[in-house]
Image (cartoon, rainbow, N blue to C red):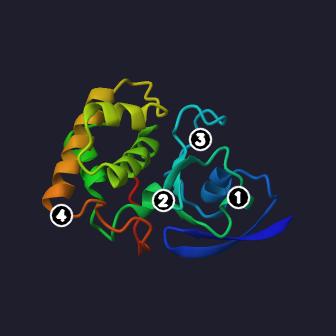
Amino acid sequence: MATYDLTVNGTTHSVEAEPEMPLLWALRDMLGLVGTKFGCGISLCGACTVHLNGAPVRSCSTSIALAAGKSVTTIEGLAQGNDLHPLQQSWMDLDVPQCGYCQSGQIMSAAALLKQHPDPTDAQIDAAMAGNYCRCGTYNRIRSAIHAAAGVMVAQNTPQGPQIGSPVAGTQAQV
């Protein structure tokens, strides 16, 4: 086993693990950040999506060794204290989740999209979200929530919303 330094949501943690351990297990089992979900285990469903240096990755197939020394943002890192990220708020406002299992991965992929395209078209949303599957079929609500969050972020003149990856003191927002 080796020791790896992981910077997750702005806080650095030392984790002892085998180098091939999936980042997902380090986040959930070692750091207690359970907002990131296990879905398929082979990078197909998107439930485990987190940001690695700002880019969306599947944490089920990203090794802890690969993530070491990089910035990891989970669903818990999108909120700023008690202030939800505009995506999290729009998800709640539009009642997007049905079962909710895939939604943290959906939101993380949407956050990466809005960072790249502050006012995305339907085609850009569809392309960015193509690797995130929702068995409940809430895709229309997901698209509507992304548009709503984009509108809020553009109106606030903050194309990326709150600073993603900042330390989150005492909050476990997982919407």
Disc 4 vs disc 1: Cβ atoms closer than 8 Å?
Answer: no
Residue at x 33% of width, y 28% of height: 139
The residue singled out by tag 3 in the image is 38
As helix, strand or loop, the secondary structure at mark 2 comes to: loop
What residue is shown at x 45% (from left), y 37% (from top)?
Answer: 102
User: Reading the chain from its start, which is encountered first: label 2 or label 4?
Assistant: 2
Whole-number angstrom distance, CA of label 4 to CA of label 3: 35 Å
Query: Which residue in the protein does label 2 denote?
Result: 54
Q: Earlier in the sequence, mark 2 or mark 1?
A: 2
Amino acid type, mark 2: Gly
In percent of width and height, residue 40 lies at 62, 32
Q: Position of residue 119 (x, y in %)?
A: 23, 47
Left of 17 or right of it: where is 26? left
Q: Which labelled disc corresponds to residue 147?
A: none
Label 3 sits on a secondary structure element that is: loop
Mark 3 or mark 2, which is nearer the start of the sequence?
3
Residue corresponding to mark 4: 157
> Residue 165, percent across and down?
44, 67
